Image: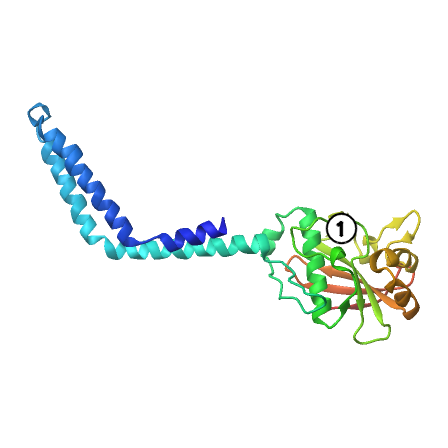
Amino acid sequence: MADWCRDKAKSLAVQDIINRWKVLNKIFADEVIGRLSKVEYALPNGAMSDLRHLLAESQRLQNQAVRPLQSAVDEVKVTLNRIANALEKEVGGLQAARVGNKTPVRLERHDPNIVRGWNNAKKGLYGELISDEYMVNKGFNNLLPDNRRVRSLEDAPKGRGIDGIYGNPNPPPPYVVTETKFRTDADQYVDSDGTLTRAKSPLGLLGNTKSSGRQMSDQWVNDRLEKEIGDKARDVRQGGYEKWLMIVGPDGKIEAIHKLNPGATGIKQTVKP
């Protein structure tokens, strides 16, 4: 649809409109006035005179219309291109455009009013894309394999795994594990799989699991490292890591980073980027 809007904007031309107007005037003169003039005797008094007056008026306006039509066409072109830009942002504005661990192209921030209309899965992906951009732009090295990274808003949610595992450019510790929550409203948050949680405090966003304890606890993270990064899991366990709960706001900005204690039951430090 964005391409259609741009093509339509390019194809609009005042002369084409004038030419069509001329054709319509000719049809009116030949097909309407020409035919009816043959039976003018049967028409109401003044009917042919009225038709000829209408034709003359149309021809007069046609000759004077170039300048106002040009202004109108220019305005339509601007509007169509603006619509195309908005559509392109919605469809692909948040493509991560990563190659390996290189810094991605800056992600497009969407109007919060538009974001509010998205479903929860899309909001969760949006938050994870933004938190990953933040980490990579700060020099952190994303250790997740390509098939575990969120690439765009069109991705399928990857489930309740670890959101991010990064090499820390400023150790200690040498690694950082992240969990992202996208704040949709006051006390309402969405995680990367689209699950909506209501909580009064950041710690209330972390649930308990049957086999691994509390989400983002050391046990929970250690149980998932090998599945996420394979053989690199040993290096992360032995080297040590911090765990960050990252909050993304509707405006596409990191609102807070909460550094968690070993059991994910307390916050050691909160950073406001």
**In the image, residue 140 lies at what x, y percent?**
76, 70
Q: Residue at x 50, y 57 (%)?
A: 85
Image quadrant occupied by the C terminus: bottom right
- Colouring: rainbow
The residue that mark 1 highlights is 158
**Does residue 103 appear left or right of residue 31 in this picture?**
right
Work out whether residue 122 or residue 92 is closer to the camera in this orientation and state it: 92
Q: Residue at x 79, y 75 (%)?
A: 169
Graded by Cα atoms within 10 Å as few (under 14), some (14 to 19) or many (20 or more), the crowding at tag 1 reads some
Q: Secondary structure at mark 1?
A: loop
Q: Is residue 130 above or below residue 170?
A: above
At which x and y percent is residue 175? 84, 69
User: Picture coordinates of residue 216 (x, y %)?
Assistant: 86, 58
* 252 lies left or right of 38: right
Q: Measured along the vertical axis of the image, is residue 125 above or below residue 35?
A: below
Q: Which corner quadrant of the image does residue 79 belong to? A: bottom left
Residue type at the position of mark 1: Lys
